[in-house]
Each structure stands twice: as C-alpha cells, then as structure tokens.
Image (spheres, rainbow, N blue to C red):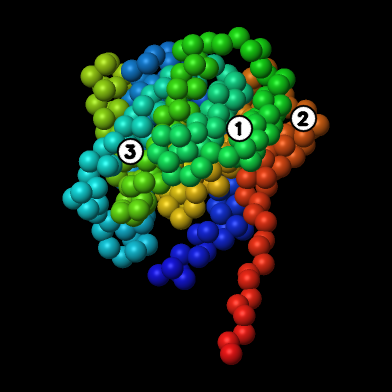
C-alpha cells in the first residue's frame, strides 16, 4: 500500500499537480466575473449566493459521478464521515464562497486575487499553531513572506491600497475559511477518501446555498449556451482541482502543498487581464520578478538537505 502511495509524495508529481490546481483556481476569478455579467445584471447578494450554490451543487454531483465511473463503483461516505463532511462543507464551500462571491462582486479581479493569495499564510499558521500538524519554523515563515511578496508585486499596477470591507475584506475572510478547510481536509483524509470528502461537501454546501439564495429571492438567468458553458467549466474545475488538492494534502504536510497557493493569484491576474476589461495590466518585468519570488519561496520551503545514511559497523 505504501509503495503505491509514493507517487503522491514525489516532488515532481506534487509540483505539477499543485500547479494544475492553482491554474484551475486562478481561472475561476475571470470566469466568475464573466458569469456575473451573463447571469446577474444587478449583482445582488441572494442571486450571487444562488449562482455559487448551483455551481457547487453541480460540482459535487460531477465529482461523485466521474470518480464513481472511473472506479466502477458508487462512491459513498462512511457513516462516521457524514458529520465531518458537514463541517468541511461549512468552511470549504458555504463560508468561503459566500464571502468570496460577494467580495468579488464588490472589487476588481486583480484586487480580489491579492486578498485570496494570503490563504497559504493562514493555512500554515493554523496547521502549526492550532492543530499542531507540523512545526512553525523560520524557514516556513520566510518562504511565505517571499511568496506573498510576489503576489503583491504582480498586482502592484492594479492596487490602490484602499480597503473595501464588502469587497477586499470579504475575500480576505474567504481566504481564512479556505485555510481552515485545508487543515480539516488533512485531518479527515486520514480516515476517509479525499475524493468522497470533496464531492459530498460540495454537494451539501451547494444545496444549502441554493436554498438560501432562493428563499432570499435570488434569480439566475441561463439564457445562452455561453452561460451554461461558464457554469459547467466552474463546476468541473472545482471537481478536479479540489479532489486532487485533497489527495495531495492527505499524503503531504500542509505547508508543502499550500505554499503553491501563491501561484493562484499569478494565474488569476494573467487570465483576468486577458479576459476582463479592467483597468490594470501587469508588466512583463513585474511578472518575471513575481515568478522568481514565488518559485524561490516554494524551493525554500520544500528543500531538504540530504543526510548521508550511517553505515553500520561490520558484523564480526
């Protein structure tokens, strides 16, 4: 069993998988903003929550369906995992995305990526100080500072440093909730398949948000193929990215995985600039320095000095 799981701790596999997840999540920012334009002309809070709920309910269904087909059996959670799924769903889907969707509706895609880019800091602090999953070291703090410096730099042209509580503030609360969910996933995945945890927490959280959005008077219009395409893409990226992220967290320290989160804003800013008609543009120089800083942070955190194994004395 251990042999088969070695791939999930392999540095190349972890790096490529984590970067894929970050690229998918980074693409969510411009697609969500486009989804607002297509379906939410007024951007009211109930409709925003309803839009998010539909996305995650669909993501949960797709996760369970796709992986059930792949494994040729219906994926069902253990009875003792149901309460864990509810807790995980509260932080990962309901709290995180209610704050994120409302926040993103009240700020630019660029500024939103800066606030959300702080989640790696929070995840490492929470894992170390509150859950005692690993030690908080100077190396980890330094790696986070270097990585976050890159996040700030890539967004420098689009930042005015004026805090909008219902925009930037809400996205920041979303990042804290996401950090808590990463630590919880690490704990819960010891006793349950992370794919099952991902799929069912999405479905439960999405259903809750749909009910809240509908009761509050939210309305979402699906009047074109483009609208349906955006929704399907958002659901699929959640299904793929979070399930894969959960697997990485199961077999690796939280800090080793979450440090890659600093790449999410890089992908988010690049795609926001390409796809959205917003006022900021990232210079090639800023982008290059940003990538160097973030990669330096990742290398610092993941570097381990090879220790030569002691050769036992010859048997006499």
Left or right, residue 275 beside residue 57: right
Which residue: 37% across, 62% down? Answer: 70
Label 3, on which residue? 88
Label 1, on which residue? 265
CA gap, disc 1 to disc 2? 13 Å
Task: Return the x and y of residue 77 as percentages of the image width and height.
Answer: 24, 52
Query: Earlier along the polypeptide chain: callout 1 or callout 3?
Result: 3
Are there few (<14), some (14-19), or many (20+) residues within 10 Å of tag 3?
A: many
Split into 4 quadrants, where in the image is the N terminus?
bottom left
Split into 4 quadrants, where in the image is the C terminus?
bottom right
Are there few (<14), some (14-19), or many (20+) residues within 10 Å of tag 2?
A: some
Which residue: 36% across, 32% down? Answer: 91
Q: Is residue 24 visible?
A: no
Residue 286 is labelled as 2
Foreground residue among 16 and 179: 179
Circle 2 sits in a helix, a strand or a loop, which is it?
A: helix
């Amino acid at each position: 069993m251990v042999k088969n799981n070695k791939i999930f701790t392999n540095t190349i596999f972890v790096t490529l998988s984590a970067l894929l997840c970050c690229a998918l999540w980074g693409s969510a920012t411009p697609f969500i903003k486009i989804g607002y334009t297509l379906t939410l002309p007024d951007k009211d809070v109930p409709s925003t929550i309803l839009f998010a709920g539909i996305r995650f309910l669909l993501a949960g269904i797709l996760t369970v369906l796709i992986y059930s087909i792949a494994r040729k059996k219906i994926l069902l959670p253990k009875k003792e995992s149901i309460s864990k799924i509810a807790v995980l769903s509260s932080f990962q889907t309901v709290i995180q995305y209610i704050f994120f969707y409302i926040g993103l509706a009240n700020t630019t895609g660029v500024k939103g990526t800066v606030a959300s880019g702080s989640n790696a800091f929070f995840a490492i602090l929470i894992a170390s100080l509150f859950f005692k999953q690993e030690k908080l070291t100077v190396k980890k703090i330094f790696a986070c500072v270097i990585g976050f410096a890159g996040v700030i730099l890539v967004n420098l042209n689009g930042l005015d440093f004026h805090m909008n509580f219902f925009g930037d503030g809400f996205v920041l609360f979303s990042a804290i909730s996401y950090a808590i969910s990463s630590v919880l996933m690490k704990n819960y995945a010891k006793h349950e398949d992370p794919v099952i945890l991902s799929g069912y927490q999405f479905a439960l959280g999405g259903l809750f948000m749909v009910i809240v959005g509908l009761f509050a008077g939210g309305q979402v219009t699906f009047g074109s193929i483009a609208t349906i395409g955006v929704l399907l893409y958002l659901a699929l990226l959640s299904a793929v990215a979070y399930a894969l992220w959960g697997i990485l967290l199961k077999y690796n320290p939280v800090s080793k995985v979450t440090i890659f989160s600093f790449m999410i804003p890089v992908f988010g800013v690049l795609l926001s600039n390409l796809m959205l008609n917003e006022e900021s543009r990232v210079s090639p120089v800023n982008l290059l320095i940003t990538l160097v800083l973030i990669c330096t942070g990742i290398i610092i955190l993941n570097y381990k000095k090879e220790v030569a194994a002691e050769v036992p004395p010859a048997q006499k």
